[in-house]
Amino acid sequence: MTMNSHCKALLFDLDGTMIDTAPDIVAAVNRMLDEFGAAPLPFDTVTSFIGNGVRNLVRRSLAAAGLDERVGIDRAQPVFERHYAATNGQLGRVFPGVMTGLRELRQHGYRAACVTNKPQALAAPLLEKSGLAAYLDVLIAGDTLASMKPSPQPLWHACRLLDVDPQRCALVGDSSVDIAAARAAGLPVFIVSYGYGWRGGNRESGALQGDALIDSFEALPALLARRPLTANHA
């Protein structure tokens, strides 16, 4: 699919794309595990679980810690959420270049939305605390709709709220979940080279096949100023 014209709006993933939230999440997971009497998990292990929503994160963490048969997800998830409410935005950081890139995109007239699988109650305060909310017009969280990424519905919903045709939008993310959502929605997708999706050998295997690879949000204005972009189909 070739875009009708140049891109008018961008949709941004949150964890691993705009903010390095892994330190906050890992701390909350290990506090949860400690409460259930289990040893902490390695940082990279927990990070590899990020991206498919809180329930998936908690379920996989319980399994990795050997607690899945003893502690049910419905018991563990509220414990994780309680700890994450305390760590959210405390240890993580905005990735270099994100704020500058968003500021320049706004100066060039682009509209912007955050489309994340993180629940609204966690995503909204994090965006406010980090200062990123000032550069975003819309937030679509993991519980905004009945479905979340890789469903295309959150992307289309963001486009509707931005009042921009999906053919004039692009998604910026870091994972196979973002790529699958963009492909389903018919949007081009740019992958950040520093994101969590590169863990586990994906860089070497070429597993993340977006329409462009960027090292920083600062590259976006020049990239978008080029010829109309094409979204590959997978």
Image: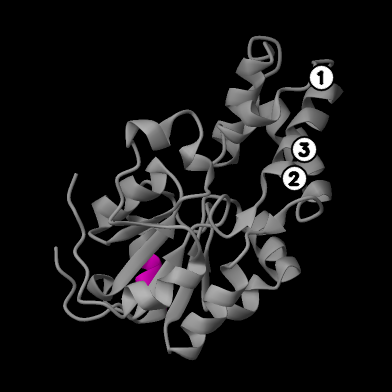
Residue 120 location, x and y as percent? 62, 58
The span from disc 1 to disc 2 (Cα, nearest Å) is 19 Å
- Amino acid residing under circle 3: Ala
Q: Nearer the viewer, mark 1 or mark 3?
A: 3
129 versus 22 height, above or below? below
- The secondary structure type at the circle numbered 2 is helix
* Apparent side of residue 28 relative to residue 59 in the rendered image (left or right): right
Q: Give the mark, 1 or 2, whose residue is nearer the N terminus.
A: 2
**Closer to us: 78 or 233:** 233
Q: Is residue 137 visible?
A: yes
* Residue that badge 2 annotates: 24
Q: Residue 66's quadrant in the figure?
A: top right
Tell me if label 2 and label 3 are in contact, CB under 8 Å: yes
Residue sitting at 78 percent across and 22 percent down? 40
Residue 18's x, y, as percent?
57, 60
* In the rendered image, the vertical position of residue 221 relative to residue 114, given as above or below: below
Give the labeled residue for mark 1: 36
According to the picture, the residue beneath numbered tag 3 turns out to be 28
Secondary structure, magenta segment, majority class: helix
Q: Quadrant of the N terminus?
A: bottom left
Give residue 162's position: percent from left, percent from top. Answer: 40, 79
Instruction: Give the distance between the C-alpha atoms of the residues marked 2 and 3, in whole angstroms.
Output: 6 Å
Q: Which residues are magenta?
A: 157-161
Identify which residue is drawn at 33% across, 81% down: 8
Query: Looking at the picture, which amino acid does disc 1 mark?
Result: Phe
